[in-house]
Amino acid sequence: MTAPVIALSKMKPNDPCWCGSGLKFKRCHKATTERVVPGSLSPRRPVPDSIEAPPWAATGGGSNRSEDDVRTPEVIDRMRRTGRLAGDVLAQVGAAVAPGVTTDELDELCHTLTIEAGAYPSPLNYNGYKKSLCTSVNEVICHGIPDSRPLRDGDIVNLDVTCFREGVNGDTNATFFVGSVDPESQRLVRVTRRCLALAVAEVRPGAPINAIGAAIQACAEAEGFGVVRSFIGHGVGETFHTDLAIPHYFDPRATRRLEAGMVFTIEPMITVGDWRHRLWDDDWTASTLDGKRTAQFEHTMLVTDDGVELLTLRADGRWSGDGGQPDDPI
């Protein structure tokens, strides 16, 4: 009889490692359960003067959050093109994820691909953020800063890409496996992807915003996972983050009805354990309070006359990241 698989979050040092190596957990993949320790940062990467840049590129500030929630057809056309670019950049950077690769190397690739496409990497200098990509490893919920830490076999990493081109932003992210990943983390990533897919299915004119969070929360909690409350989806367009708020949990106050022409992100962050977070001393990196793993997927989307259009799909129409496609079994 095959021994039952022990969840990564419950493994003890002397248990056989989940990977089947025959080694004890402490001699094999235990290091991937230790809290992420920040590495050193490389200098800020330059952007050519020929690249159209958003206001915060020079000021280090944020963006004007007051922007019409319903976009004009002309703005929507620009957002389609920029969103597709962001989806393609995410796919290419994700393909470089492997054990031994540093998150700084992934940032360099993201920066280069974005610049080569004639776009500006939106995170760079947004409220002083130092890099072109967010890389959130294992228990890091969001806004992890790329550094010299090499990825380890058994890690999971979320890559968050936003491109600014033609005066608008395209914002997307996905979670990737680093080498061989334990069954619990694989399931976490699959469920997170499904949460986003179910949320997208709720998007249509007339639907209340809180139907989105209700779908996410019901799926996550049915699978024994938690939903982060402190970070939510947002409106996006010429501004990086607008006032339009999209909670990823059921909020009885979020009763506003969706309208055709709205563009926003849905980006659920799902946790193995406690959904609460702690903020690192860098004032950016948010990690789970209990150190257990978390995963995230994100798309920018348009409310159409009869449903929804994802603006940040890859060129082949598929989702980036691991854990299968949205309709695959959990």
Image (spheres, rainbow, N blue to C red):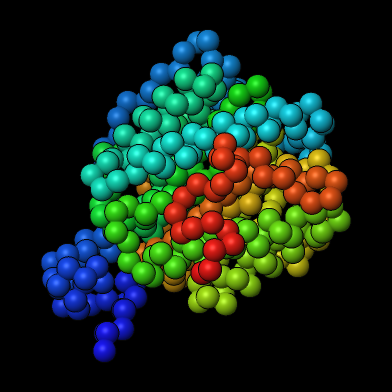
Indicate the position of residue 233 as horizontal and vertical percent values. 63, 50
Indicate the position of residue 11 as horizontal and vertical percent values. 27, 76
Indicate the position of residue 213 as horizontal and vertical percent values. 67, 63
Residue ID at (61%, 46%)? 299
Relative vertical location of residue 286 with respect to residue 221 in this rendering, above or below: above
Residue ID at (67%, 60%)? 199
Residue ID at (79%, 26%)? 74
Evaluate whether residue 25 shows in this view.
Answer: yes
Name the quadrant containing residue 187.
bottom left
Residue ID at (68%, 32%)? 79
In the image: residue 69, left or right of residue 53: right
Relative vertical location of residue 11 with respect to residue 322 in this rendering, above or below: below
Quadrant (top left, top right, bottom left, bottom right) of the N terminus: bottom left
In the image: residue 266, left or right of residue 255: left
In the image: residue 193, left or right of residue 110: right
Name the quadrant containing residue 85.
top right
Relative vertical location of residue 167 with respect to residue 63 in this rendering, above or below: above
Query: In the displayed image of the protein, which residue is found farthest to the bottom?
Result: 1
Indicate the position of residue 259 as horizontal and vertical percent values. 84, 48
Relative vertical location of residue 231 with respect to residue 93 in this rendering, above or below: below
Evaluate whether residue 123 shows in this view.
Answer: no
Tell which of 68 and 113 is nearer to you.
113
In the image: residue 262, left or right of residue 24: right
Q: Give the total number of marks visible in the rendering.
A: 0
Tell which of 88 and 51 is nearer to you.
88
